[in-house]
Amino acid sequence: MGLTKTDNFTTTQNELASLAKALGHPARVAIIEYLANSNSCVCGDIVDVIPLAQATVSQHLKELKQAGLIQGSIEGNTICYCINGEMWKKFSTMLEPLFEKARSPNCC
Amino acid sequence: MGLTKTDNFTTTQNELASLAKALGHPARVAIIEYLANSNSCVCGDIVDVIPLAQATVSQHLKELKQAGLIQGSIEGNTICYCINGEMWKKFSTMLEPLFEKARSPNCC
DNA sequence: TTTCTTTATCGTAATATTGCAATAAGACAA
DNA sequence: TTGTCTTATTGCAATATTACGATAAAGAAA
């Protein structure tokens, strides 16, 4: 069907899945890494850095923005995309207990 | 095209994306949470816990296994699915620098 | 043996994702 | 105004994902 049955799961499960899914493409990982490592918010440069067409990069940026992992603000002629610290904190908080438990496996 | 251009990205970027993608579905989040929280490795119970058909759950388990987030071992008539601690450690290690940098945003 | 239980796989349908060229939309410059 | 620069959107094709019923495969139990 191609349609995820979100109704069957908790809000938290859906939120975590949504964030993970947004990061689930190498181009979007590359975009996040670039934004995390660049000092300035020189955003149009993303297209130059990511080896995909401008339209495709714009689409990936849209998905990251919709998931909340980045935010965009208009700077005159340009748009400044930045890491959304709050959402990453939330992401981290949701993953932490899983990382914690995976550290001490309880079987096998 | 529906085909991700993995060649254009680094191995690490592809690996992180692969792990994130595997977690990018609420059913798979629910499976991981169940495995992390259940003391015993009572694995066939996953199907009872996840509100999807058996065939669908099996498919999600396969994806988690292919990503390496869980492992399955045959126990007579049953299969025991467990968290793969090593892979979660890797996942955590790859995400940590991103979490770290997102904590101190450098612009906007 | 037969039957039951458990899990995987097949086949199918519906929807989603990925990627790009072309185009549009908006702000600035001349 | 016109032209240029930057980013978004549209339209399309190819592939992937999600979901489920039906079936298969393999061990357990009778």
Image: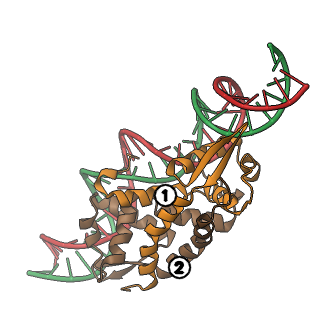
Chain colours: A orange, B brown, C red, D green
| Quarter of the figure with the C terminus of chain A | bottom left
Residue under label 1: A19
Q: Tell me the subunit letter for badge 1.
A: A
- Residue A104, above or below D14: below
Is label 2 or label 1 in front? 1
Between the C-alphas of marks 2 and 1, the distance is: 19 Å
Give the residue at x 33% y 62%.
Answer: B57
Looking at this view, is D30 or B80 the one in front? B80
Looking at this view, is A27 or B70 the one in front? A27
Q: Tell me the subunit letter for badge 2.
A: B
Secondary structure at badge 2 equals helix
Residue under label 2: B89
- Residue A23, above or below A95: above
Give the residue at x 32% y 77%.
Answer: B37
Residue type pointed to by label 2: Lys
Looking at this view, is B43 or A85 the one in front? A85
- Give percent across and percent down for residue B68: 50, 73
Specify whether A96 is left or right of A9.
right
